[in-house]
Amino acid sequence: MQIQIRGIQKTFGSFQALTGVDLDIESGELIALLGPSGSGKTTLLRTIAGLEFADSGRILFGNEDTAGIPVRERRVGFVFQHYALFKHMTVFDNVAFGLQVRKASERPAKDAIRAKVLELLDLVQLSGLDKRYPSQLSGGQKQRVALARALAIEPRVLLLDEPFGALDAKVRKDLRRWLRGLHDKTGYTTIFVTHDQEEALELADRVVVMNRGRIEQVGSTDEVYERPATPFVFDFLGGVNVLPGIARGREIDVVGVSAPLPCGTCDHTGAVDIYVRPGDLRVADAAQPSFEAEILAVQRTGPIVRWDIRARALDQQLEVEIPHLHHDVKQHVPGQTVRLRLNQYSVFARGAKGDARPKALPDTVLIGRERERGRLG
Amino acid sequence: MTALTLPEARGRSPRRVIPGFGLTLGITIAYLSLIVLIPLAGVLLRSAGLGFDGFWHAVTSPRVLNALKLSFGAAFFAALFNAVFGLLVAWVFVRYPFPGKRVLDAAIDLPFALPTAVAGIALTALYSGNGWIGQFLEPLGIKVAFSPVGVVVALMFIGLPFVVRTVQPVLEEAEKELEEAAAVLGATRLQTVVRVILPTILPSLLTGFTLAFARGVGEYGSVIFIAGNLPMVSEIAPLLIIIKLEEFDYAGATAVATAMLVISFVMLLAINLLQAWARKK
């Protein structure tokens, strides 16, 4: 089911939960609504379900405006963060609920319901647990029951509200992979809400990054990670160091290094902010333009080593992520000086004073990647 | 296996996380004995003086049987009405905001605080043939005051807060998500209430019913004013006990008391089992 969202606005009292959201979702897509808490992602999901009512704007399922359709007639599958299973019912009755509450004329025969429920339990790999009560299941199992229950009504769209939020890390990871497989098998148009960027990037076809009731960027997982449209997306996906710089024509001065403005033809003069991911600060060769920094702390997290450094030219603390191959245990210790270079970066023109959203320069392109490859090749 | 047993685990009693089990259990038993068990044992002991035949004779006299029937029957029906309407009251208080809600909410507890005799007199004045409400009911052939119906009305007044106050917090804590889940799955409001909400509050509703019922069985003050106390018709068992005491028929009084005790115990036990079953589901 193709879904079109047009100019959705929603306020709770004086709080603007959604401020004019537009979004198109293709049939069969798996979409992540990603954002921090309070960004409006759950409100948007609940509005699509019909559990909240927008103050203005329209939501279309295919060509049908959903405004007049009450929640129970929308035929959406909704999975809640805390499962919301009916505790007094067995797993079987939970899954069968959506079919059993139908009007007698539309309700499948008892045998048909039974067959359908068992088939769904098989799909979510819970065969044989149909007589259990929710209290006898683990968190991951509960969430799969909730999913089977949502799928039983053959929903036009499947909506998941932080579906893995209440589960522990290991189960979360397994369930994520499994859900991706399930989606590829069943092909339901699926929208899920998450505040976990890793989850969004791993699971979704497209990611919708939200902040303060607005959509910051919509794109494939590669797009939002490689070409963040706004400083917020940059910061939210992967973390970032923000360095002050001055643009002079096609060059920028940053931490005492002269670097090219990362777009082919553009020309800019004035204060800019340079956004660099921790992983894009690299140890420099003697020949490369680089800046001096003192290592303050070293922390090893698996294959990545994290340094806290202080750039001498800036007197600003920065975060660096170094592949452990490049980390020299003897030399790279707190107190030592290293020379670093910028690998990949984005440049945002600093807005007028008080402007919280600096404007990205036109055609902001990250150039570092190509250069890196050339050097290694 | 034994070689691996740690020294701490070899002690006679298992180690508990919360200390003071022995002390608290001791106090509990001593307190229960003083307040509940010893007085009740006294009742049983006293009636045992009658011998079984004497006891049976005392308890199965028509007047006693009728009184017991009225006490338990009226308490049952009053508790049943209160379960239905108390649930409704709790529902309205929890779900809807309306002006004067706090005042009404506080008024629910009044039957707890009011001397029961006051309640009885007020109800009698209202429902007697020339009372505010009775004057309209009597022409319709409904006689409330001085009849078994009056007993039920008095017990409904007494029992209402028990149901409201036990159901209210459970309703308040009921997950809104459950109702949303039901709605998304296509359930109507009625289906949601019957299939999702009621089963979740059933255990607390049963508790409220039990408390109201138990209170009704033992109620005395409010009933004797409105009941009219006609032997065989509207005479409750607690009153009969008082009457027998005033006639110095101590053995007869304790016999009735013992009968009430046994019936109450059996019924409460049955309801508790029912509750355990409902909770387990």
Image (tube, rainbow, N blue to C red):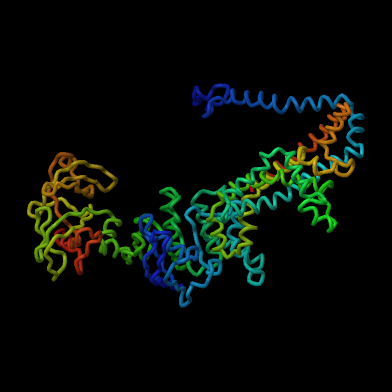
Q: Quadrant of residue A181?
A: bottom left
Which of the two residues, B252 or A83, is positioned nearer the viewer here? Answer: B252
Q: Position of residue B135 (x, y in %)?
A: 80, 54
Question: Compared with residue A218, is residue B148 higher up or lower down, i.e. above or below?
Answer: above
Question: Compared with residue A61, is residue A132 higher up or lower down, i.e. above or below?
Answer: above
A4 relative to A288 in the view: left or right: right
Which of the two residues, B107 or B244, is positioned nearer the viewer here? Answer: B107
Q: Residue at x 84, y 58 (%)?
A: B139
A161 relative to A255 in the view: left or right: right
Q: Position of residue B122 (x, y in %)?
A: 74, 45
A361 relative to B194 in the view: left or right: left
Which of the two residues, A63 or B93, is positioned nearer the viewer here? Answer: B93
Q: Position of residue A120 (x, y in %)?
A: 55, 62
Q: Residue at x 20, y 63 (%)?
A: A366
Instruction: Return the residue found at the far left.
Output: A287
Q: From where the camera sits, is residue B276 visible?
A: no
Which of the two residues, A60 or A78, is positioned nearer the viewer here? Answer: A60
Instruction: Return the residue found at the far front.
Output: B130
Q: Position of residue B269 (x, y in %)?
A: 73, 39
B9 relative to A274 in the view: left or right: right
